[in-house]
Image (cartoon, helix red, strand yellow):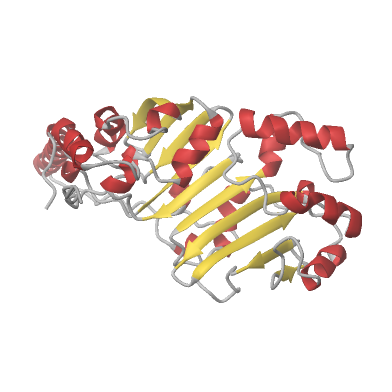
Amino acid sequence: MPRPTLRSSVARLGLLLGAVALTSCAAEAGFTPQALPPVVSETIPPYAADADVSPGRTALTLVPADAETITITDFDASRAALGMPDLTSQDPMSDRSDYWERARRETVLLTEGMLRADNSRLALDYGFTQDDVDWEARFTTPEGAGWILGFRPDLDLAPVRRAIEDRVAGLAGAEVDAGRNLVSVGAVAEDEESWADHEGIFELTAEAPAESTYYRAGCVPLGSALGPDAGVQDQDAVLAGQDPTDLDPLARFALSFDDGLATARLGPGRLDLFERADLAKAFPEVGPLGFGDALVDPVADPSTGRIGYTVRESVAAASVALTDLLPFAVCNEVTPMEEPTGL
């Protein structure tokens, strides 16, 4: 069982003493206190192409419930951030090239676009490109990987159907949802459970559109958060600085990026949030890229379960998310690393 930290113990004691005091006062006044109503999590509405709701939220209704990791890249939000909100394949090549050159440096993209490598062929033979994709989701499940492309609502999908039939640009086998202008592999059917059905998911999503969002089921093992080059001495350094076994369990989390900021969402009412925000300080430098190269200046709010960061470098921020170099999300169990044998 995880050991409580001093800070979390004080917080829990404060809540307990507050409850005792309220009960005592109520008894002295001669009435029975009523229990507070439980916090009811809001539900995520089904995805609609023309709805004024962030795809970083509603796209979860299309992702299988057993997905282990999910990335949602909102190209519309990225274009808007760079002053090009209406950019499509119909715009001059110079404008489109300028967007892609700036997007990687000035916004955080968790994918540069599934179709982008085939833009020239798609433009010449089919009349659409990656620039007509409003958002893109990728996910992994026990059965394999899947993806969803949300095309702009006014795009005719007939050329996209031809590209699927011609098996170009990785579109072979994709399904088309003409009513919502979606093209996908592995998306859920209407009667199947989705990631949006998990309890408490709404609180992990952002109301305003984010450039990109990373979702993960479960916590990140300490060894994974340290990186592939980490050894026993690196894990021991973390344990000496701040023991992760003192943390509370973490069922799932989200990390979103927008306008030079990052927000980790772990769920409301977390008494271990300050400890999780501080964990990065105990992490040694391992390998060419670390968490501190990407995100800095944490600000924690336990009531909402959020940790805010400043994005230090956009490409690094995307890399630490995609490779799970995320100290705030570590598990509260530590698997000992094997000592090197020298063989």
Q: Is residue 178 above or below residue 155?
A: below
* Residue 21 image offset from top left, x and y in percent: 12, 37
In the image, is residue 154 above or below residue 244? below
Q: Position of residue 289 (x, y in %)?
A: 42, 33
Q: What residue sits 16% from the left and 48% below the top?
A: 339
Instruction: List the single residue furthest toward the front.
Output: 343
In the drawing, does residue 72 fall left or right of residue 227? right
Residue at point 24% right, 34% down? 275
Is residue 199 at all visible to an observer of this figure? Answer: yes
Is 254 drawn above or below residue 242 in the view shown? below
Please state the horizontal and vertical placement of residue 25, each as a whole percent of the image.
12, 38
**Could you tell me which residue is drawn at 53 percent across and 45 percent down?**
213
Q: Nearer the viewer, residue 276 or 13?
A: 276
Q: Quadrant of residue 296?
A: top left
- Left or right, 181 with respect to 236, comes to right
Residue found 81% across the figure and 64% down from its top: 160
